[in-house]
């Protein structure tokens, strides 16, 4: 072990190997964690020109060698020698290694040998070697590898991510980049959500209007004229090239055509394939919309023709046909559909969906494919041909697996990667059900309740990046990385090896690799969070702020400054909450054992103005509400800010514990955002407030939360502001008013009473003011 540590210091591994985590003491920083690593004696140095060998005519070995060289070039800055039949890095076939994705890698004084029986095994051995060679502070310099042997194979066969390119279309180049970085951590399945109410992204040559019309939508209005249409689609030639590129990297692409619900873009293109023949616009509303596909003979024939073209592009085993959130109102109101249900002898609309899924499942089976759908396809009976992707918790997976169907776990909210990673102000838009790196890592893909004899039906798990609020490539990448590494480890590595402390240490170099490859990688799990001890009013009254500093992972040593300078490895170490006079700004970051900051430094301002200010991220829900979404100013906004935490069922947020014995006035910044929510049967949950002026008012009340808890407490109307005509007023504006002098901390509710037909109002920022002293 001492000899190995001596070598490790030259490669940047020493800090990781000397960690407090027992298993990390014997394992290089690899993600996901290999099944076994055995350390040897000696070493081998890889530098510019180190040659790679692959068997002649073994195209998969040559592809693995090419991928290795590409990653090492970007991530380490070394140019390996051309691949030939001889070289110090050797790819070999070994029939004794069982499993298409299993591999063995050995390093000794003579070189590196990667052996596997399957193509993907060679590929994953290449990715493990690429990780061993990078990154550290020796970019561009040779790497001395310690002698070792890695024996490795995955726990699950489905290790995936889902990209929703239907809600917000992403350029094909972006998808290529995600495929590259999936391969780097041995993820092997990319689920592409290609159609939805808001866009049809797959070119169907027999039905060109699906993309000519269904591929484009008009953004929702915020009061004035809507903006130009947005959208796009992928040609079949583009997707065939992507499929081939992904296959070279061990990634299978699973396409999804969502039916019978989420079909508004389809019906917009071909109204005759809908229920009533009307032609809606392609939707700009997020959520659940009423338009359903028509399951009559013409509709069934249409889907089979679409499947023919889909199968010609995507050669993988599975085709995803959605099945989720299909509210059945249109079917219930259609005499034609009701007659079909009766003629087929089915039990209602759910039975019709089950029958429809069975038709498509049988058709796919005739072509050597398998149907998979969201867990709603269980309703009405699950056809024998279907597999289930369980998103509404694990119940669907347990039920389907115990019936003998294959399942993939992707439960919300844990594996919904559009969920925010922290509650800090600097997070981009997404769902407010915060799912940290630790939350994803601790998820167990084998649910309790599945009979041991049926456990083989659990194919694996995937994370889903739904894109209602993920607009730009930056935002999608921010949500995917680094949580994709957690998904990789929980689906590849053995359950008994699960160790979050060791994982976050091994994750550091992988995050650096992703960044060197041009990916945006969130540092949310490693950034410093600040917690004011007590209320802001207490700090202002005492003229003293006590602030605690933490990180989500606890990894590294927090260091801070109070003079406005950036923290360094020599800055003071945080040991206990800091007690400061208001006006001091704390700047802090955590540093690893090598003195490298694990995240961008974050600041906390203790000035009186800052303590009296709350942004939308600091507001809370009004009584009887809940903040569920973090939305941008516009549905197509290309910036990460401003963002607004909202309750889509009520235009009201609250400033908690406002020090009304200190503050004498307030200024509230107001924003008007789109009201583009498809609420289906939840439409009656939206709270309407009687407007007593044409466009409604903003009513500011004190003690509103307290009054909701205690009827004896009466809320105080602080101010009422008449809202302007949304068609003529700017999208962001400001109101100011005075505050009543009360005895201490009181809540302030900001309630908008605009008509539900108007856009959605919310608070961007509230600044309380006090008399100059």
Image (spheres, helix red, strand yellow):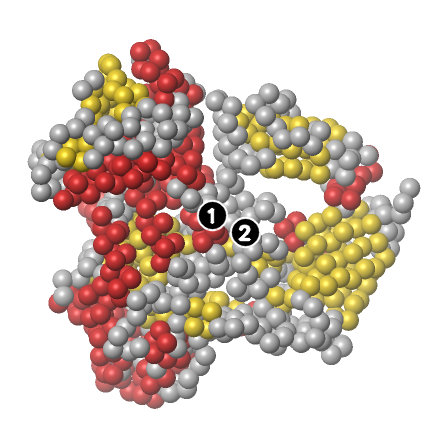
Crowd around label 2: few <14 · some 14–19 · many ≥20 (10 Å) = many
User: Is residue 704 visible in this depiction of the protein?
Assistant: no
Residue found farthest to the top:
2
Say which label, 1 or 2, has the lower sequence index. Answer: 2
Residue at the (14%, 66%) spot, across then down = 367
Q: Are marks 1 and 2 in contact (CB under 8 Å)?
A: yes
From the viewer's side, name the closer residue of 20 and 237: 237
As measured in the structure, the alpha-carbon distance from the residue carrying label 1 to the one carrying label 2 is 8 Å
- Indicate which disc residue 114 carries: none
From the viewer's side, name the closer residue of 447 and 475: 475
Query: How far from the left and from the top, in percent, is residue 301?
Result: 22, 79
Which residue is label 2 attached to? 428
Q: Is residue 114 left or right of residue 94?
A: right
Q: Which element carries disc 1, helix, strand or loop?
A: helix
Residue at the (77%, 39%) spot, across then down = 607
Q: Is residue 176 left or right of residue 49?
A: right
> Which picture quadrant has residue 559?
top right
Query: How far from the left and from the top, in percent, is residue 271?
Result: 36, 84
Which residue is label 1 attached to? 478
> Which picture quadrant has residue 109?
top left
The quadrant the C terminus occupies is: top right
């Amino acid at each position: 072990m001492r000899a190995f540590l001596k070598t490790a210091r030259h490669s940047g591994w020493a800090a990781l190997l000397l960690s407090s985590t027992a298993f990390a003491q014997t394992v290089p920083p690899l993600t996901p964690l290999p099944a076994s690593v055995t350390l040897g004696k000696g070493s081998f140095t890889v530098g510019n020109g180190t040659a790679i060998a692959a068997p002649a005519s073994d195209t998969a070995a040559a592809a693995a060698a090419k991928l290795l060289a590409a990653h090492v070039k970007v991530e380490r800055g070394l140019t390996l020698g051309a691949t030939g039949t001889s070289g110090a890095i050797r790819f070999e076939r070994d029939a004794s290694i069982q499993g298409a994705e299993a591999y063995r890698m050995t390093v000794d004084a003579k070189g590196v040998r990667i052996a596997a029986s399957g193509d993907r095994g060679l590929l994953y051995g290449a990715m493990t070697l690429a990780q061993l060679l990078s990154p550290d502070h020796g970019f561009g310099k040779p790497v001395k590898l310690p002698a070792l042997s890695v024996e490795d194979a995955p726990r699950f066969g489905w290790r995936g991510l889902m990209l929703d390119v239907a809600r917000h279309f992403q350029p094909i180049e972006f998808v290529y980049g995600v495929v590259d970085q999936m391969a780097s951590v041995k993820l092997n399945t990319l689920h592409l959500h290609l159609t939805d109410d808001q866009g049809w992204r797959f070119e169907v040559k027999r039905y060109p209007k699906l993309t000519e019309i269904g591929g484009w939508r008009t953004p929702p209005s915020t009061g004035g004229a809507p903006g130009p249409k947005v959208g796009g689609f992928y040609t079949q030639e583009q997707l065939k090239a992507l499929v081939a590129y992904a296959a070279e990297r061990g990634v299978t692409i699973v396409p999804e055509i969502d039916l019978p619900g989420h079909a508004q873009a389809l019906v917009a293109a071909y109204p005759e394939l809908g229920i009533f023949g009307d032609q809606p616009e392609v939707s700009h509303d997020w959520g659940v919309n009423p338009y359903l596909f028509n399951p009559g003979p013409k509709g069934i024939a249409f889907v089979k023709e679409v499947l023919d073209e889909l199968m010609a592009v995507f050669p993988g085993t599975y085709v995803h046909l959605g099945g989720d959130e299909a509210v059945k109102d249109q079917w219930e109101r259609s005499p034609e559909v009701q007659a079909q249900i009766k003629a087929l002898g089915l039990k209602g609309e759910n039975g019709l969906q089950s029958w429809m899924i069975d038709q498509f499942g049988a058709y796919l089976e005739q072509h050597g494919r398998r149907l998979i759908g969201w867990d709603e396809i269980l309703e009405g009976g699950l056809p024998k041909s279907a597999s289930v992707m369980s998103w509404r918790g694990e119940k669907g997976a347990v039920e389907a697996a115990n019936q003998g169907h294959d399942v993939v776990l992707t439960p919300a909210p844990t594996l919904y990667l559009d969920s925010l990673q922290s509650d800090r102000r600097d997070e981009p838009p997404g769902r407010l059900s915060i799912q940290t790196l630790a939350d994803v890592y601790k998820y167990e893909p084998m649910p309790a309740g599945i009979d041991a004899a049926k456990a083989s039906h659990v194919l694996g798990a995937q994370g889903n990046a739904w894109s209602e609020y993920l607009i730009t490539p930056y935002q999608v990448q921010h949500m995917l990385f680094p949580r994709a590494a957690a998904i990789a480890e929980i689906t590849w590595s053995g359950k008994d090896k699960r160790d979050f402390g060791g994982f976050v240490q091994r994750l550091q170099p992988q995050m650096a690799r992703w960044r060197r490859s041009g990916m945006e990688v969130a540092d949310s799990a490693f950034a410093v969070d600040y917690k004011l001890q007590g209320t802001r009013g207490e700090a202002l009254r005492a003229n003293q702020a006590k602030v605690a500093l933490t990180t989500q992972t606890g990894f590294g040593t927090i260091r801070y400054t109070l003079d406005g300078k950036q923290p360094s490895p020599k800055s003071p170490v945080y040991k206990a909450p800091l007690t400061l006079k208001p006006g001091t700004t704390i700047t802090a970051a955590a540093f690893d054992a090598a003195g490298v900051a694990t995240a961008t430094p974050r600041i906390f301002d203790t000035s009186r103005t800052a303590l009296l200010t709350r942004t939308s991220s600091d507001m809370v829900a009004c009584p009887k509400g809940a903040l569920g979404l973090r939305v941008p100013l516009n549905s197509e906004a290309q910036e990460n800010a401003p963002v607004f935490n909202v309750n889509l069922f009520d235009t009201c947020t609250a400033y908690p514990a406002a020090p009304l014995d200190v503050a004498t006035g307030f200024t509230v910044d107001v924003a008007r955002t789109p009201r583009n929510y498809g609420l289906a049967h939840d439409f009656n949950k939206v709270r309407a407030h009687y407007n007593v002026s044409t466009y409604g008012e903003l009513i500011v009340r004190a003690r509103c939360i307290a009054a909701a808890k205690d009827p004896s407490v009466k809320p105080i109307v602080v101010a009422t502001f008449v809202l302007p005509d949304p068609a003529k007023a700017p999208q962001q504006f400001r109101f100011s008013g005075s505050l009543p002098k009360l005895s201490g901390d009181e809540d302030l509710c900001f309630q908008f009473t605009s008509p539900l037909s108007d856009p959605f109002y919310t608070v961007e920022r509230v600044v309380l003011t006090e008399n100059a002293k």
